[in-house]
Image (cartoon, grey):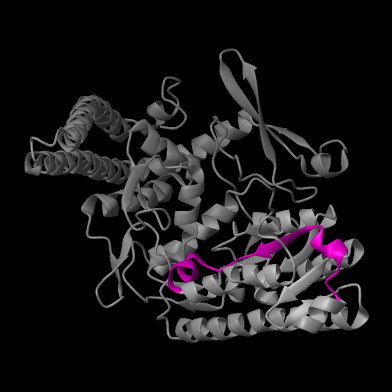
Amino acid sequence: MDIDKHEKVRLEHRSRNAYLYVRQSTLRQVIENVESTKRQYALRDRAMTLGWDEQQIVVIDSDLGQSGASAADREGFQKLVAEVGLGRAGIILGLEVSRLARNSTDWHRLIELCALTNTLILDEDGVYDPGQFNDRLLLGLKGAMSEAELHILRSRMRGGILNKVKRGEFATALPAGFLYDANQRVILDPDQQVQRSIREVFGVFRRTGSVMSVVHEFGNKQWKFPVRRNKGPRPGDLQWGELTRNRVNSILRNPRYAGAYAYGQSRHRKKVDGGRIHQRLPREQWYQLQCHAHPGYLSWEEYEENEKRLRANAPAPRTQQTGAVREGPGLLQGLAYCGVCGARMAVRYHCRGERLVPDYVCTGNTSNRGTPPCQLVPGGNLDQTIGKLLVETITPAKLELALAVQQEVDEREAETNRIYQAQVQRAQYEATVAERRYKAADPDNRLVAGTLETEWNDRLRQLREAEQVYERQRIARQAVTAQVRKQILRLAEDFSQMWQDPLVSQRS
């Protein structure tokens, strides 16, 4: 060490600061592996032995709990590189190369800056001058070995994970509606409100075939949807919030809900700025897929049918798919194809008097090449012919159709009532728990009792709101249901007249 001190550490180095970089890879290591942290902080004594004053030693320890695989999220390492680039560092102290970087790109960039600014590097083995070829070669080898060590560690962990995946035993984060039991087996969430909410998502999508229809159904009826947080201070806690389009898409595409165990459904690739690109893989590229691995909310056949409907609903034109049914009176929307180019025809509406009349336009070449449409077919007479054919087809079975519709309306009404009752029951339970907590507190401890009293009042207010929503919706549903029953009876009596009635909405 004395030889290093006299040969490499010069006065120009001691005139600048010594930067001690301290890092641990994870927060668990920071808490449990305290000896490594102590050894890193002890390098201050090495710097003082080499001639630096204590005031000249700058400790950078803001990256405790950060991985060294990339410099993107390490503010401390970025600060260190900036100080070296500005020529303020005389020496960098690190317990070993892996503490500074486990990425060859970051490590060689630091070595290059140190060589340009005449900055030394110190680890447990000695002092190195990146401006000298032998030291530069040795530092490069140490960096390569550090990166290889990280690769080996990851490979071992990855191998163990994949081995458990093959057996279907690797525990992954479960979506809302599932839990692990004491034996780490996947079971349905015992909360009945959670189950009903998830089943309602699949039921509405099965009935409407549209993701946004599911979102609107929940929003119009003021239903909340359960979410189990995997991160945060209390992971696993159940929270209730608004249902969004992205969440409905993830539910419909998640094979877990069909009782399947799947692994490797997506691939993550790093970007230049340190972020990640998420890419969903086709099913044939998944690493593992085991159908009927645990209980689910729908069958595998229903899951595949949902995926087909989602692909068909995609906005891009596809010659073999019908697309989602949109608002409007056009009967052949998503069903008409151009006889010239084979592309799916779009629907355009114009007013004729007070009603909308559709036209079917081929826009395949127009959107791609800017050429005129292949053809435009007026839809007024065409839809009348299709409607007449539909009435003639439906009329013989109008009674069976009316009975089937009546049964579906009753089932939907019963399920809606159960969901509202579950929301009221949950609010009642949370209010009861808040009341017990308040009464169990010491009344003399006003700091605690006041907070618990506020929480109890909030829960009571939420209970009243849930009861009011339930009552309002119950009255509104009774009126709507009575009207629907009248329409069903009218449907059974004269389907053709109802079909031509301009007062009946297109969605009906």
In the image, 184 versus 130, the foreground residue is 130
**Residue 410, horizontal then vertical, whole percent:** 22, 41
Quarter-of-image position of residue 426:
top left
**Residue 508, horizontal then vertical, whole percent:** 40, 32
Q: Is residue 485 visible?
A: yes
14 drawn magenta: yes
| The N terminus - image quarter | bottom right
In the image, 282 versus 210, the foreground residue is 282
Q: Is residue 93 above or below residue 156?
A: above
In the image, 42 versus 384, the foreground residue is 42
Furthest residue toward top: 353
Q: Is residue 84 above or below residue 392?
A: below
- Horizontal arrangement in the rendering, residue 78 relative to residue 409 (left or right): right
- Horizontal arrangement in the rendering, residue 301 relative to residue 467 (left or right): right
- Horizontal arrangement in the rendering, residue 233 relative to residue 388 (left or right): left
Q: Residue at x 31, y 75 (%)?
A: 184
234 drawn magenta: no
**Residue 87, horizontal then vertical, whole percent:** 85, 55
| Stretch in magenta | 8-32
